[in-house]
Amino acid sequence: MARVAIVTGGTRGIGEAICLRLQRQGHQVVANYGGNDEKARAFTERTGIPAVRWDVGDHEACIHNCNDIAAEYGPIDIVINNAGVTRDGVLHKMSFDDWNEVMRINLGGCFNMAKATFPGMRERGWGRIVNIGSINGQAGQYGQVNYAAAKSGIHGFTKALAQEGAKYGVTVNAIAPGYIDTDMVAAVPAPVLDKIVAKIPVGRLGQAEEIARGVAFLTSENGAFVTGSTMSINGGQHMY
Ligand code: NDP
């Protein structure tokens, strides 16, 4: 059945792959993005998927834009909380702003989008929320106390909201990607990246499409009995 799906941070990287996969499954997809209008325009030209700019860390903007999207396309049944940023630095050099900004966007964005869409899913008796966490939220990472805390928070948020949605046909799951070949990872210096790849048992970075396939399963009817879970897609880099 065709549903309305919002993918935050959907205009590039992992988000774009998720948009394309959900579109291929017949859903009406709307991508959100944070500020890069040029990339968003190119994305819409490439895919035919509308892209709407707002900051997922802004509570009112999430409510208002989700209401507008629902008015235009219909009730929002699928939300993929994928938008994320990094502001790396070791703790003694990390500013309070860098801490706050990463928490506000990565973790606050999940809360804001859930506030905007979960009540409707609950009332209609069907919904799918997938939150994109990270291997670094599971295992921690040097120089990322903000990012690791926000991503780890996503995993707790997922388990708590899953309990609230379970009786109402709303599943809430997380995916914890390992290192995926996107702009975010391209920003990692080459020598550091070589060391990272050396620690991935399958011997390569992941592809965005490999995360999108996980999302496709979790948002499908086949995923109805899976809730509160974290799907690790990381080439075997972190197992537990
Ligand atoms: P990219 O940096 O390639 O893309 C990030 C996307 O998020 C862009 O569309 C960007 O919009 C959007 N975005 C950033 N800030 C905001 C905001 N405040 N409001 C709305 N949208 C925003 O990221 P990736 O594709 O690499 O990562 C996607 C997700 O996967 C993130 O949550 C990331 O933390 C997670 N992840 C990624 C891994 C990797 O190896 N790449 C590993 C583990 C997790 P714009 O283009 O306008 O800036």
Image (cartoon, rainbow, N blue to C red):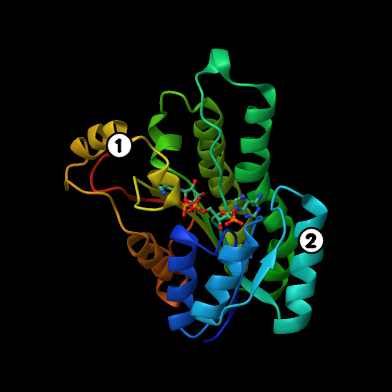
Q: Secondary structure at mark 1?
A: helix
Query: 120 or 65: nearer the eye?
Result: 65
**Is the residue 91 above or below the residue 83 in the image?**
above
The residue positioned farthest toward the top in the image shown: 92
The residue type indicated by label 2 comes to Ile
Q: Residues within 10 Å of mark 1 (few under 14, many from 20)?
A: few
Q: Residue at x 53, y 38 (%)?
A: 86
Query: In the rendered image, is residue 79 in sight?
Result: no
Examine the image and state in which quarter residue 214 appears.
bottom left
Q: Left of 229 or right of it: where is 198?
A: left
Cα–Cα span, label 1 and label 2: 40 Å
Location of mark 1 (residue): 190
* Residue carrying label 2: 63
Whether tag 1 and tag 2 are in contact, CB under 8 A, the answer is no
The residue type indicated by label 1 comes to Ala
Query: Could you tell me residue 153's position as x and y percent?
Result: 56, 37
